[in-house]
Amino acid sequence: MGIATLINEVREFGDFEFYPTLDSDIALIKKHIDLLGYDKPYSVLDIGVGDGRVLNAIAHEYGEKYAIEKSLPLIRALPADIMIVGTDFMAQTLIDIETSVIFCNPPFTQYSEFASKIIAESLAPDVYLILPTRWSNNQAIKDALARRKATFTILGNSDYRSADRPARCTADVIHISLSSCASRRWDRATVDVDPFAAWFSDNFDIDAQGSAARKADSLHQNVQPDKFEIIAGGDLISTLVSHYDASLEKLIITYKGLEHVDGSILDELNVSIDSIYAAIKLRIKSLKNKYWKELFNRFTPITDKLCTSTREEMQTLLMKNVNVDFTKENAYAIAEWAVKNVNKYIDSQLVSVYESLIGESNITLYKSNQRTFGRSEWLYNRKPSGLDRFALDYRIITSNYGNFGGYSFDRINGLSKSSANKIDDLITIAHNLGFDTLGQERASTVEEWEPGKLRTFHYFDHTAQKKVVLFTARAYQNGNIHRKINQGFIARLNVEFGRLRGWINTPEQAAEEIDGVDIDCAKQAFQSNLKINVGTQFLKLN
């Protein structure tokens, strides 16, 4: 989508002053970041990320990219590798979002509020701002800089009157350093003044010296689990946010009660300001963690479409950002991010699962592929070099390290976890290809696994209105698993794998190349792998 089109769409949705950053300013910031000397991938948070152009340009090739954005059209225009960690910037805090760099080109009518809040709350040692040149006379920004003991450098000045979206002002490109550490080698620089400490002193007036104070750990109590009563058909996110707000308010009120306790009593109890401060910081972080985890555990409309490894990868990414404020807007924005990424995973995991099934006796070459491979090229579970344009047979034998060994906690229903996961992953792939496996057998629900005994897995055929065998499996003591797969499923799997690998480009080509695939089957199979649309019922999470 072009910049002009995106600007118009943002205006129609509700204008949040999306002024695209000049290319010259982006280059200036990137050059300065490179001069800082980071020796490893650094992370960047872009506040008001827009369409992601600036973030992608200044981020490290392998660094994590985070964003705060209020406009829904802009959120939906972002690439899938940009993690949304907030929506309404002025309604949340930065004091526990850990990144190396923060960038913001704020709405010029609110530049003072944005700049002073970023400076006051940033945990990143390096902040880049684009502000109207009059910023240097703004008292709120001066106060924030002084409080954080920050230094600044004006990197350049730009005229935004001729930008993609004109603004009637010139602007400074500013670098603000919140760390006196001169080196960024190995990302070791930390801020000189903890922003949480400033927040604590603003909000709590507790008289405690604690000359022999107990360690903060003694005040660290685990947050007790809440009972999340979700009414059927209700809004899960609204309910969880309501619980969170009430829990946070109760937490703050509890600790503010210490303001009414005589300081001498707190001192006698060996309670210091430092221990109270550390305890509050931990409790707030734990509270956010708990509620985000509760939400992520209910992402099943999304995560049910993922295989074991990709589901774990997505959940790991989600849980890395549990310090984000738990608000309704943030929850929906992160759910949108999850939908974008699940589509990327759905295609890549089909290829991964398919390739795990490849073996000498398991494949047939495309009709146009006349190559042959010697038996030695398949030794030790290797795949021949240059192997391409092939399909899987419906009878498949794979080898694993073991199906029945190990400790009991490492088995699922008598079968090793790795083997059980492979069974369930194949069921997930089938479901994403249009075979309704909801409520049908999984590795954990069939009769307990025994060596050589047949286990059967079904899908529900809505045309015939009956259960149909999807595949059968026999697991053996030597680590082999023998599968016999429904020929309609294997045909559809072969077509989609060939399409994703770029070997076939049309249904007609699939029918010509792959044994057992006619033109009707090819048309039904081509591009049948599931895609979830942003804005669908998956985001409701009811």
Image: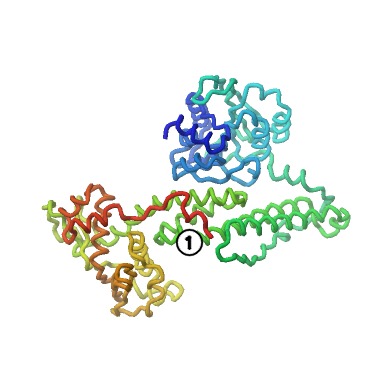
Note whether residue 101 is visible.
no
* Residue nearest the observer in this picture, 280 or 266: 280
The part of the image, by quadrant, that contains residue 459 is bottom left
Residue 448 versus residue 385 in the image, above or below: below
The part of the image, by quadrant, that contains residue 353 is bottom left
Q: Position of residue 435 (x, y in %)?
A: 33, 64
Q: Position of residue 27 (x, y in %)?
A: 48, 26
Residue 354 in the figure: left or right of residue 375: right
Q: Position of residue 5 (x, y in %)?
A: 45, 32
Give the amino acid type for the residue marked by disc 1 in the picture. Thr
* Circle 1 residue: 300
Note whether residue 270 is visible.
yes
Of helix, strand and loop, which one carries label 1? helix
Q: Position of residue 136 (x, y in %)?
A: 68, 23
* Residue found 51% across the figure and 52% down from its top: 335
The quadrant of the rendering that contains the N terminus is: top left
